[in-house]
Every structure is written in structure tokens, then in C-alpha cells.
Image (cartoon, rainbow, N blue to C red):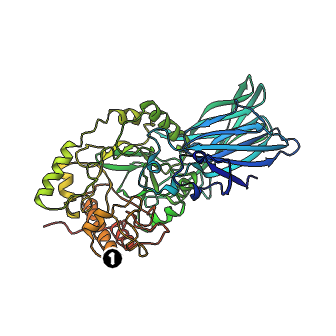
Amino acid sequence: MVEEWQATALEDGSSGFQDVTVPGRPAAFAGAEGVRYRTRFDDPRDPGDDVAVVELEGVYARAEVEATGERLDGDWVAEHDAYFEPLRIPFRPGEENELVVTCRAPGDRFGGIHDSELVPEELRVPGIWWDATIETCTLPTIDSLTVTPEVTEEGARLHVETTVLTDGPIDERITYSLRPEGDLNARGMMERESVEIDAAGKTTVEHTVEIRDPALWWPRELGRQHHYTLTAKLDGAEHSQKTGFCEVGFEDGQFRVNGEPLNVRGVNLLTDSPEDVDRALSVNANLLRAHAQVLPEAVYERCDEEGLLVWQDLPLTGPGGFDKDRGKYLARTLSRQYGAHPSLAAYGVHDDPVDAFASGLGSGFLDGLRLRWRAWRSDYDAALAEEVADAFPDTRPVFPVVGGPGVDGDAASHYPGWDYGDAADIDTLLERYPAAVVAEYGAGALPADADGAAADAAGFDAAKHDRRVPGNHEDSQAYQASLLQTISERLRADRVPAVAFSLRDTDTAGMGIFAHDGTPKASTETLARSFAPLQAFLADP
């Protein structure tokens, strides 16, 4: 319904618009601090429809939205500052309409990897990244349905928030029905909840559904991925949400899923394509870490279907303070928006708050002393991150800080063989700087077509690479593969959860085991062997 868009950069002083594709990240505006998008459309309503609803997904990072017509739930301009939460605006359009969306770069510390050097400028363009639609409906209607599952001693329950949109007072009932998906042989249910609304606009109604003997959702190597669908109906309108029941804990250095231990083998994700799920599965990973970014719904849906767990970070990375209240708000918003997904296994708050190894170290005696000196100076006060962590629900493990040697984080960011020392030093690092989880480790490698063209690649330190690998892309990939094998297998032998960095490059070279275009590097086969679910290791004599 909304197919033709134009855009212009705010700071170029020009009123000229050019055609762009939405959703997307127009490369023509790489480096822009703000981009204004517009589209024009006729009244989309059919006879009997009351309103139109604009829905924008992945609006990065801050946005103001204005359209022709009368807005039902407030005044124009609508503002938005959490890109992972869909923006829905109901309005009564005119015969001819214009929708204008002004997107700006982050104004605070919560831009995540897209406000860092980990991704190139063309992937940071402020815009509508995931989807843009206009739908029509009669009133009253169900505007949104939020479902948060919880496993209990008696069975399970669903915490439901139903947002109702109306043009005046109503006294109705919402009917909730729960049904199992696929060939799951489990009982469904139906309940009703009264809803009384005194004025036009949006009203949120809370409800709890109790479930006895639920079929649980399991990671792929532990069991089946059972799902349920909850449907809410109101006066002819309905809204559905797919979900599942899964209990995740972390105790004594081990993840437990539905009470069963799980040896975590993960990869960090800097990209956000559903195809990345297949890439992760191809190397036998059972967990994706959304590294200082929030993944779109399409990726979560694939993880739900495939039994792949997700460690979801807040979009917060690198040194610098941040607004605690803003962080807590984003934590609550994030957990509410994605809580329905049974694959969501853990949360993270602050990624790599200290950059002690921007210049790399070698493996000699003096460099070992320099490593200890830099680690000693890597002091970080985790109080703010811990307060933000408390805003997440207690039904999932939360790791307030992921950091390198000396940071004393809740999970480690260790790069032996890349930032310092050799790959085999991982044992010594963990003895001196203990961590229950190693959430980052790895080395950069050149894709086959990147020889001599990677010096300025985002997320790739060419100086560190050239110090380790003097040869071409074959030598580069061989070094990465050897390092990943050494660290992965030592961590697995010691039963330490291991999350390699990273799955796929964001630029012409990087730390990924896949190139940016999805071409596998040599390390994919190596990591797949090291991450095999059943693995035998020869212990050191």
C-alpha cells in the first residue's frame, strides 16, 4: 500500500528528494546525521473502515512522524526513540495524504553497534529499516497484543497486555483462546475478560492465563520446539501472538533449560538477516548473541522454529557513561516486546565498557607484563549496569557487564592470539581473570576477494591482523581457524560456555567466519567440528 518513497538528508541544506526503497538503509545517505522520508497515498479505507493505522518497524534511532489527517491517540508530531518497538499511529486520512518520517542518529549512548566502528556508515543510515505498512480497520479494534510466558511449579501462565483502540466509550468483553500449534497434542482453552473504556484512544487491559501441563519448548538438541498461539477477539476484531514455554537459568557457570544442563556453543551476531540463523546452525551453534543490537522479529521467529537460543543485549557498547533511567526504560520495553519468544534465553546490558587493548600486544615476557598492567588499570564501576539489569524480568539470566581482562565483568571478552598473547593462553587468562562465560573470542580474517582491500574495513583491525598474519587470505583464514579451534575446544573441555566473535562480517573484512556476502571462510568447517554436539577431547597429560 505504501510503495513509493523519497528521502533527503537534513544537513545538506537542500529541499530536493530522491527515490529510495523503504524499508532499507539508502547508501546515498551514508554518514548523514538525519534523513527525512516521505510518501504520498490516497485514502486507503474501504467503505465501513473507520481509521487507517501506520506501522513502522525498525525506526532508527530517533524519529518524528507527521501525516495528513486526524490522529486518534494524540497530536502530531508523533515521536519515537526505541527502534526495536513498532510504532503504530491510528489516524483518519484525507482523500490525498502525505506521511513524513524524520529519522535521526542516536542522541544518547543507546545506539549500540550502529553507533560504533563495528559497522560501516552505509549500515548506520537513520531510517525505517525493517518494515512500513498502512492497514485499515473498524473501531473498536485490538491494536496490539503482548504476551509474556512464565513456567511455574503448577504449570505455566501467560501475562497478557491487550491494547484496545476505540473512538469512544465501550463496555465489551475480550475473548482469549489458546491453541497448540502443529501436531502438538495438548489442550487449549478459552476465557473472557471485561473491558470498560470511557474515552477515545488507546487503553491497555491486563489479563493472566493459567495453563496446566504445558508442552515445553526446547533447544533443538534437547527436544522439540512446541508452540502455542494466543488469540484475542473483540467485536469482530482479532489479534494473535505465537509463543512457547521455556525456563532458562544460569547457575554455577552452567546454563539450564527446563531444568536440563546445556553446554552453550554460541556465536556473536553483528548482522540481522534471518539467513544468519541457518549460518549459525551450520557451525553447530546453539546460541546467538545479539551483540549490542536488537534483532528484528523475523530473526526471532526463525530461532523459535529452529530451536536456537538468543542472548539479547541492550544496544549499549564501548566506554562512556549512560542514563540509568533511559537504560531501565529500554530494558522494560525490550523484554515486553520480545518476551513472547521462547528462544530468548538471556539479556546483556553493557558490552565492552573498557577498551584497554586498542593497540595490540604480542606474546613475549614484556608484553605479558603490559597485559597485566593494562588489566590492572581497567577499572569499571558496574553499579549503573547492575541497576539497569534489575529492570529485566527475573525469569531469564542477565549479564550486566561483558568485559575484558581486569574489568571483572559477568561474562568475559577475551582475545588471546589477537589482542595479546597466543590462543593457548586462554587457560592462563581464565585462571587470572575468572569468568563464568566467555562471551567473546576470535580473530579477524580476510575473505578471498579482500587481499589488500581491508585496511579501512569496519570492525577489522588491519594492524593487529598484519602483526599476526603476514600472508594472503589463505594464511589469514588458516590463522583464524586455528585460533578458534584452540580456544573453543579448551573452553568446551573445561565446560565453559563459549560464544565466538563473530558470525558474519559487516564490511569487506572482519572477525566473521562468514564474509559479508555469506561466503564461508575456512574457519566455518573448523568451528563446526569444534562445536559438534558430541565431542571427545584428549586431556592434557
Frontmost residue, 494 versus 472: 472
Frontmost residue, 180 versus 494: 494
Extreme residue toward the top, this view: 198
- Residue 308 lies, in percent from the top left, at 47, 57
SS at circle 1: loop
**Number of other residues with Cα within 10 Å of mark 1, as a class: few under 14, some 14 to 19, many 20 or more:** some
**Rendering quarter of residue 464:** bottom left
- Residue 216 lies, in percent from the top left, at 50, 50
Q: Residue at x 87, y 41 (%)?
A: 48
Determine whether, in the image, residue 419 is placed left or right of residue 241.
left
Extreme residue toward the right, this view: 47
Q: Residue at x 60, y 40 (%)?
A: 63
Extreme residue toward the front, this view: 13
- Residue 138 lies, in percent from the top left, at 80, 39
**Rendering quarter of residue 455:** bottom left
Determine whether, in the image, residue 166 is placed left or right of residue 537.
right
Can residue 187 be seen here? no
Quarter of the image with the C terminus is: bottom left
Frontmost residue, 221 versus 11: 11
Frontmost residue, 145 versus 462: 462
Q: What residue did someone put label 1 on?
A: 472
As displayed, is residue 354 above or below residue 140? Answer: below
- Residue 450 lies, in percent from the top left, at 41, 72
Determine whether, in the image, residue 120 is placed left or right of residue 451.
right
Can residue 245 be seen here? yes
Q: How many marks?
A: 1
Type of amino acid at the residue the image marks with label 1: Asn
